[in-house]
Amino acid sequence: MVKNISAKLITQTVADLSIKANTVLRGDILRALEDACKKEDDKRAKKIFKELLENARIANDKQIAICQDTGMPLVFVELGQEARIGGGGLKDAINKGIALGYKKGRLRASVVSDPLGRSTPGYSPAIIHIDITGGNKLKLTVSPKGFGCENKSQLKMFNPTGGIDEIIKFIVEAVASAGPDACPPYVLGIGIGGTADFACFLAKKALLRNISIHNTQYAIRKLEHDLLYRINNLNIGPMGLGGRTTALGVSIEAYPTHIAGLPVCVNISCHALRMASALLI
């Protein structure tokens, strides 16, 4: 059955999600920070974890931004093929919602319309990814991405003969080169396969997954565990001052690729991995 979803409802939903994503830390990330704090032996690292948790509590209670960099807004859309948008275009409705939410939530304007001329920052447009699904529902996920960590993204086009050890070395070195600069402890999204651009999309999409849920493929799930172990042995620690936990989680998404290539992308998130979703039915 075809379902009508109003553009006005989409705008308001995106506005609400923009505020929630920037002020309420994801539950799995909060629990991971609490667990890391309990396990930490280093007194300075433990103190930093307590401060990160206190920061998240204050942001939630006072409805203020978790971080002053409220990011480049990303919106992931799962649109049922039997849903119809009425009263306006989908992208326009989303961008209006981003602007409305960021202004209402007193969130920083960080988007320059001219990437070379560096014009006066505004709130939008967002980066919008649309996936057409079955049914007549619409799922919206707002995930702001700060550029302290986004700037540490890396892509490598491996030879098709590239082995697991080479991939691990590349990913661990990407984290090591980020060092303290992207506000650890980190969450890593890894994209493997597809084309260069699609591997980068997969890496970003991987960050949406709850870090306690691992890939269903055994080899990739094992790679997630191996990477987390090796990255945490780097001793970068929270805010780069040493400690047991350099990364809270590693999530990998994979896709078929060409016989002549093996793209691998690393997308690093800081400890404030932000995301909020809503399902319109």
Image (cartoon, helix red, strand yellow):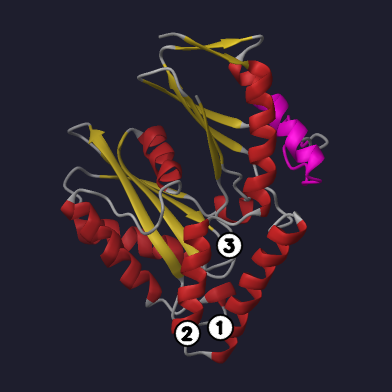
Instruction: Estimate the spatial distance between the alpha carbons at disc 1 and disc 3, rounded to whole Å.
Output: 16 Å
Which residue is the site of mark 3? 182
Amino acid under label 1?
A: Ala
Residue named by callout 1: 45
In the displayed structure, would residue 142 be above or below residue 68? above
Residue displayed at 51% across by 70% down = 33
Q: Which residues are magenta?
A: 94-118
* Residue 63 quadrant: bottom right
Q: Secondary structure beneath disc 2?
A: loop
Determine whether label 2 and label 1 are within 8 Å by CB: yes
Q: Are marks 1 and 3 in contact (CB under 8 Å)?
A: no
At x 77% / y 37%, what residue is drawn?
118
Residue 103 visible, this orientation:
yes
Residue 39: x percent and y percent?
44, 83
Mark 2 highlights which residue?
40
Asked if residue 125 can be seen in this view, the reply is no
The magenta stretch spans residue 108: yes
User: Which three-letter amino acid code belongs to the residue tagged 2?
Assistant: Glu
Q: Nearer the viewer, mark 3 or mark 2?
A: 2
Mark 1 or 3, closer to the camera: 1
Q: CA distance from mark 3 to mark 2?
A: 20 Å
The local secondary structure at tag 3 comes to: loop
How busy is the neighbourhood of tag 3: few (under 14 within 10 Å), some, or many (20 plus)? many
Q: Residue at x 62, y 15 (%)?
A: 6
Above or below, 112 relative to 237: above
2 or 1: tag closer to the N-terminus: 2
Nearer to the camera, 212 or 165? 212
125 or 265: nearer the eye? Answer: 125
Residue type pointed to by label 3:
Ala
